[in-house]
């Protein structure tokens, strides 16, 4: 899909204590900022078509999460949702962005949800597509195959070359090849202790998210995407839900329709003034 040239996209990189972050950026920095967080198997380029739609009116910022795309972490720092949240906060602080809107897909929605809970005064609104970060009874066991494909102790990768040419074997090999290309996502989703993953789930937190939240869903969503969407809708206190036309895009939806839905939500919730920091005035001297 060729990109329009009337809203040029810039790139940036910054060295932070947690690692080096790379990002794509469009629009004017003085405009309202929208931060885009990519999904498990993508990087910030996932958002470029949508940014082209919004950059004429919004300041758009799409970072590569640590370990994805052109961003990298410092050695020996384990990947986690908390790590991604703190890296994003360091980036926004360095860029002097005090208030933003978050738009996120898949794993990015998990990070965005936790970010909104950790820094509620900084997030104006939240919009998610195919959001991860919750467990549902209908989704139990859906990661079992992927764990077996990437776990260091698993014999499955060793025997894959010897299992023949059946279609299901080819599907396993293709999946294994795809997982190996996303080591950070694999470590966050499949290669940590279950207790560590469960400790970062958003079940209790989503009920405290009273900020405007839009849950978008492809009209022809696959069963897993639909179940994740419904789980978020059940947990959020006051969500908006909108189906968009499915499309052969990295988001699974038509980008023009997605941009329109986001603009309508943001127009209905204009920016609020930033809170005035408290001033510690000296007490009068005692008489």
Image (tube, rainbow, N blue to C red):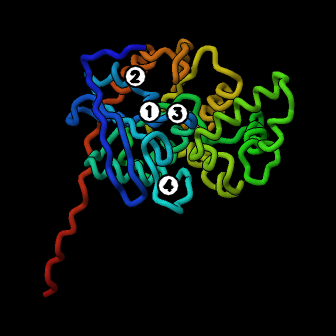
Question: Which dot marks residue 42?
Answer: 3
Instruction: Mark 3 and mark 2 in contact? Answer it, CB < 8 Å.
Output: no
User: How far separated are the C-alphas under marks 2 and 1?
Assistant: 11 Å
Assign a secondary structure to mark 4: helix
Which quarter of the image is occupied by the N terminus? top left
Residue picked out by circle 1: 103
**Front of the two marks 3 and 1:** 3
User: Label 1 near label 2: C-beta < 8 Å?
Assistant: yes
What is the CA distance from the residue labelled 4 to the residue labelled 3? 18 Å
On the rendered structure, is 132 left or right of 3? right
The answer to whether 144 is drawn above or below residue 87 in the figure is above
Task: For the residues labelled 3 and 1, say whether their Cβ atoms are less than 8 Å apart.
Answer: no
Looking at the image, tell me whether mark 3 or mark 2 is earlier in sequence order. Answer: 3
- The numbered dot on residue 83 is 4
Q: Real-space Cα distance between discs 3 and 2?
A: 15 Å
Mark 3 Cα shell of 10 Å, populated few (<14), some (14-19), many (≥20): many
Label 3, label 1: how far apart the Cα atoms are: 15 Å
Q: Which mark is residue 50?
A: 2
Measured as percent of width and height from the top left, residue 18 is found at 42, 58
Please indicate whether residue 211 sits to the left or right of residue 161 in the image: left
Task: Choose the circle earlier in sequence order: 1 or 4.
Answer: 4
**Most foreground residue, 275 or 114:** 114
The answer to which of marks 4 and 2 sits earlier in the sequence is: 2
Q: Is the Cβ of the residue at disc 1 closer than 8 Å to that at disc 4?
A: no
Residue 156 can be seen in this image: yes
Q: The C terminus appears in which quarter of the rendering?
A: bottom left
Chain-order first, disc 3 or disc 1: 3
């Amino acid at each position: 899909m060729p990109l329009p040239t009337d809203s040029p996209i810039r790139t940036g990189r910054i060295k932070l204590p947690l690692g080096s972050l790379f990002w794509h950026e469009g629009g004017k920095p003085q405009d309202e900022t929208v931060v885009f967080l990519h999904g498990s198997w993508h990087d910030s380029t996932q958002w470029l078509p949508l940014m082209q739609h919004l950059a004429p009116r919004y300041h758009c910022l799409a970072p590569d999460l640590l370990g994805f795309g052109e961003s990298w972490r410092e050695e020996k720092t384990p990947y986690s949702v908390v790590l991604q949240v703190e890296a994003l906060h360091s980036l926004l602080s360095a860029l002097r962005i005090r208030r933003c809107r978050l738009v996120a897909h898949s794993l990015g929605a998990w990070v965005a949800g936790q970010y909104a809970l950790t820094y509620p005064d900084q997030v104006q609104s939240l919009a998610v597509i195919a959001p991860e970060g919750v467990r549902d009874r209908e989704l139990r066991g859906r990661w079992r195959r992927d764990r077996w494909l990437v776990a260091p102790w698993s014999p499955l990768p060793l025997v894959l070359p010897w299992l023949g040419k059946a279609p299901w074997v080819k599907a396993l090999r293709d999946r294994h090849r795809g997982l190996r290309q996303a080591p950070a996502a694999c470590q966050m989703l499949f290669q940590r202790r279950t207790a560590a993953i469960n400790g970062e789930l958003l079940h209790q937190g989503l009920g405290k998210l009273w900020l405007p939240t839009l849950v978008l869903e492809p009209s022809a969503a696959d069963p897993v995407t639909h179940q994740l969407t419904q789980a978020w809708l059940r947990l959020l206190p006051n969500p908006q839900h909108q189906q968009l036309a499915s499309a052969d895009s990295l988001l699974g939806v038509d980008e023009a329709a997605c941009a329109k839905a986001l603009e309508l939500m943001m127009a209905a919730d204009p920016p609020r003034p930033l809170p005035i920091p408290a001033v510690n005035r000296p007490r009068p001297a005692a008489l």
